[in-house]
Amino acid sequence: MNVTALMKNFLDRFAYTLHRPRFFRQKAMIVCTTGALGLKEAMDRLSVIRHAGFDLVHKAGFYTPESNVSLKSLSKIDKGIDLAARKFFEALQMTKSPSPKLIELMAFRAQQAAFAACHDYNLAECDYNYFKNKGWLERNRQYYTDAKINPLKNMIVLMVGKMVKRKTLEDLRGVPWNS
């Protein structure tokens, strides 16, 4: 009732891009099918690609049972495929990057704070260096891209970043090897 083992393996191997996102300005669409159960769970699992930087423009999920597929079901699937293709095509034509969602901004600030804090303890050096080379550790940096950020959202995520940094430093100070 989720993604296949092969897809899970792929996602696990792809997970480093969640720490070092690189697919900004790239459009993505999730297409899933299932015989009966697990469609929502699979699409939710695949939605993690947002954190690699993808602009997830649409999710299309279809129930395709092994038998007893009615003409009504096929018509519904055809309409869903047409809608998904149209949305994806329209997204490909758009040149303006979407404004990040609050959760995406919080993920950026949390990573920014954690990697900066870990650097002081010689941890997560690859992630730290990636962020530093991209300019993402700069104090005034609001997000991975130069997206327009709502000031209220920015204030919220600044507080999140401060809390993450404080918690990370507290946790690191308590590690025995740190003494």
Image (tube, rainbow, N blue to C red):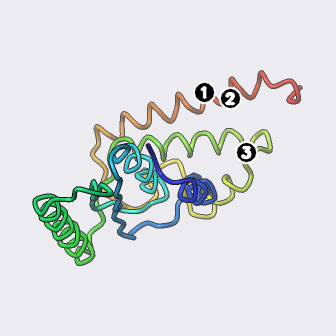
Q: Amino acid at mark 3?
A: His
Disc 2, disc 3: CB below 8 Å? Answer: no
Relative to 22, residue 143 above or below? above
Relative to 40, residue 176 above or below? above
Q: Amino acid at mark 2?
A: Leu
Q: Secondary structure at mark 3?
A: helix
- Residue tagged by mark 3? 119
Q: Quadrant of the C terminus?
A: top right
Residue occupying the point 41% across, 62% down: 54
Disc 1, disc 2: CB below 8 Å? Answer: yes
- Residue 90 percent across, percent down from the top left: 19, 73
Q: CA distance from mark 2 to mark 3?
A: 11 Å
How many numbered dots are placed on residues in this image? 3
Q: Nearer the viewer, residue 117 or 8?
A: 8
Q: Nearer the viewer, residue 29 or 139?
A: 29
Q: Secondary structure at mark 1?
A: helix
* Res 61 visible: no
Q: Nearer the viewer, residue 51 or 114?
A: 51
Say the numbered circle drawn on residue 169: 2
Q: Amino acid at mark 1?
A: Arg
Q: Nearer the viewer, residue 78 or 130?
A: 78
